[in-house]
Image (spheres, coloured by chain):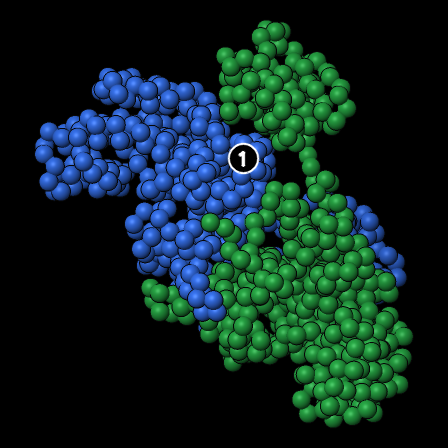
Chain colours: A blue, B green
Amino acid sequence: MSVPKGFRDIEPDVARVRYKVIDELRRNYELFGFNPLETPAIEYWETLSGKYGEEAESKLIWRFVDPFSNREYALRYDLTVPLARYVASHPELPLPFKRYQIGLVWRHEEPQRMRYREFMQADADIVGSPYVEADAEVVNVTLKGLWSVGLSDAYVRINHRKLIYHVFEKELQIDNPLPILRIVDKLDKIGPSGVESELLRVGMNESTVRRIMELIQIRGRWGEAEEQLRKVVSQGGVEVINELAELFSLITSSDRSSMFDLSMVRGLDYYTGPIFEFNVESTVAPSVGGGGRYDGLIGLLSKKMDLPATGASIGVDRVVDILVREKQAVNAYREVKVYVIYLKQELYKHAWEIAMFLRNKGIRAEIDLMRRSEAKQRKNALSSGATHLLFVGEKEIATSMYTLYEVSSGQRITAGLEDIAKHVQSA
Amino acid sequence: MSVPKGFRDIEPDVARVRYKVIDELRRNYELFGFNPLETPAIEYWETLSGKYGEEAESKLIWRFVDPFSNREYALRYDLTVPLARYVASHPELPLPFKRYQIGLVWRHEEPQRMRYREFMQADADIVGSPYVEADAEVVNVTLKGLWSVGLSDAYVRINHRKLIYHVFEKELQIDNPLPILRIVDKLDKIGPSGVESELLRVGMNESTVRRIMELIQIRGRWGEAEEQLRKVVSQGGVEVINELAELFSLITSSDRSSMFDLSMVRGLDYYTGPIFEFNVESTVAPSVGGGGRYDGLIGLLSKKMDLPATGASIGVDRVVDILVREKQAVNAYREVKVYVIYLKQELYKHAWEIAMFLRNKGIRAEIDLMRRSEAKQRKNALSSGATHLLFVGEKEIATSMYTLYEVSSGQRITAGLEDIAKHVQSA
């Protein structure tokens, strides 16, 4: 019997890193005044249907018929649509509603694509504000979150759906820009020449392709990008450029950590305004987060509650992968652990109470549960990552003086239990 | 579009209590040397099938056929069978394997029974030790966990499957004791007279019923219960009484916080040894946790790995409910929040930077995202739970002296930003 294909068990060292990341993100969301909300893993199929675009709808959502009720359900595909469902059914909410949620989502990926079918996301969203202040707050809280978990080289790339439509539909007069945008989105993967040849292959004329290649290379620091945009984008695009300028002016240390990128389009159907993608400089890994403004989504769920909204999501498990693979996070999270060793079986209860004493002092302590010999206890202690061994023999009990052995240094100290606890706490 | 029937959204105040409970339980499990493991929400149906007894198997497990692969899956029903599946497929694990897991489980309860279909459990299990030391450690870590989250009156009731079988099968010679045990298990709900009349109704003879009624009233502190048991239980039951005596001797402050209860039988099929149920004195709520030894379960998943195991589970959402309803936990978790108010729209960016300054100091800070007037900002600040208001006007910016208003006391102070931060941090 094995774990289902495409799923995985997360083992202790990695699980601890994941917990630290969750803790730090939560702390950070709270600092910005976001409130936690938890929605269930399961939604009615109708709630998710029609929100994510054709590929997700037909292939990627875990949908199923409940055999007991014949009702159709789905596992949540992201945390955004459940939020929209929550807001749409709570007209009494004071606005803006700022919430964060950290939880699992499920996607029916083909396992051979090296993507997991279950992974964790951390989302911050603001419902009710149509202003760029809200977009900027979402970007800032996400950037700060990534920095605070240890990805100090995380940065954001920003584009705007309205600018994309303006450029591709109005200026280049492409009726259905979606297939073109999908090609453009591959710029980082296949490079400019790859994009160019794909655009030609789908039958675009050369002068339009040349124009597209010029435009999508407008990427980089906002100051320079803005200058170029104001030169090449026609009158109708000025308003959205002004909006982007305002947005960039509110982003924390915008020069080093934020970029404009006209080639970044993001897949999800529901975005309507600024869109964001979060990357990490030092790694070749794909993005660690993304988001954007989605002013129409809540209206899809309740016409009466058609509210503007914006948000960004962090791929928690991607962050954890980077921390474990590239930042040696696992070792950093190891802590003190005292293994209490009894020299004779009759002394067990005494050793048991010493372990409890240490735990009551906030010190991790373990004791053998297998009635093993002293030698085997030592062996188990070392293989289970104990940092200290504490020996309990008849002499120790008689004198109330115990010997503590520090594994890394080989150093021994002999002292009363209170002093031993203090020594370990300061280790 | 609503939340699915039997499911619920957990709103901010309650979500924060749940987070605190999870944090505290994790800290406590780590103190005892348990390691975190995360298994997926989804298992193959075959993994869960045949483990939980007839009612769960036929009605309570969320099972479904994946329409893409036609494979049959199930949402996890508890955290124990996934652990057994993990251990059965990892023969390399050093023993004992002590793990904790805190996660959601799903049960197909009828919504009208006031039970949720999704709830959180926190489990500690020890795999590989056949000794009562392991059972005692599981009981202790669970009791300590309940105490540390604020349920200082939590206690454990203990019984032993082998004692139950000995008494009901060997001594009372009941061939199939299961329906009888189900009636006995209702003692707390329907009282002794209720149990007695139900037993008579299913056709038991009067002398056996009288004997059962005598036996199941053996409950209370171990010292007294032991004496009674040794009197009434025949020779074949002595060994298990000795085992229970050893177990009770290892439980933390066993007198006040642990009880023997021969009427407590617990439902799950897989238990084979000591069984535990955790309750809270001050509340009428049902148990907040339970567990026991399940030596045969891992062998069901891999014959080669037939390992002894024991564990206990805390109903996290039941704990949260008690904390919120009876212990006023919500208020206790409210924290400082500064709302930065700008007196004119032109001063917005300045106010924005002050909010960021406070967050960098670890202080929760909010700012309006709706371009509201000063009066409306104040109103929003109060309704969103701000504890302090900080005003940003032209004079403040010119002099670098700001006024901080404390909502609860009405007190005002005027100072530089560093001093204001210090003042708030010490609030």
Residue at 21% in and 27% down: A170
Residue A215 in sight from this viewpoint: yes
Residue at 47% in and 45% down: A85
Q: Is residue A135 left or right of residue B379?
A: left
Residue at 24% in and 21% down: A233
Q: Which x, y percent locates residue A189?
A: 26, 41
The residue identified by callout 1 is A97
Q: Is residue B175 left or right of residue B101?
A: right
Residue at 56% in and 31% down: A32
| SS state under label 1 | strand
Q: Residue furthest front?
A: A304
Q: Which x, y percent locates residue B21?
A: 67, 50
Amino acid type at mark 1: Phe
Q: Would you identify the image quadrant in which residue A351 lies?
A: bottom right
Q: Which x, y percent locates residue A232?
A: 22, 20
Q: Would you identify the image quadrant in which residue B298 lies?
A: bottom right
Image quarter (top left, top right, bottom left or bottom right) of the C terminus of chain B: top right
Q: Nearer the viewer, residue B279 or A305?
A: A305
Q: Would you identify the image quadrant in which residue B206 lies?
A: bottom right
Q: Nearer the viewer, residue B104 or B102?
A: B104
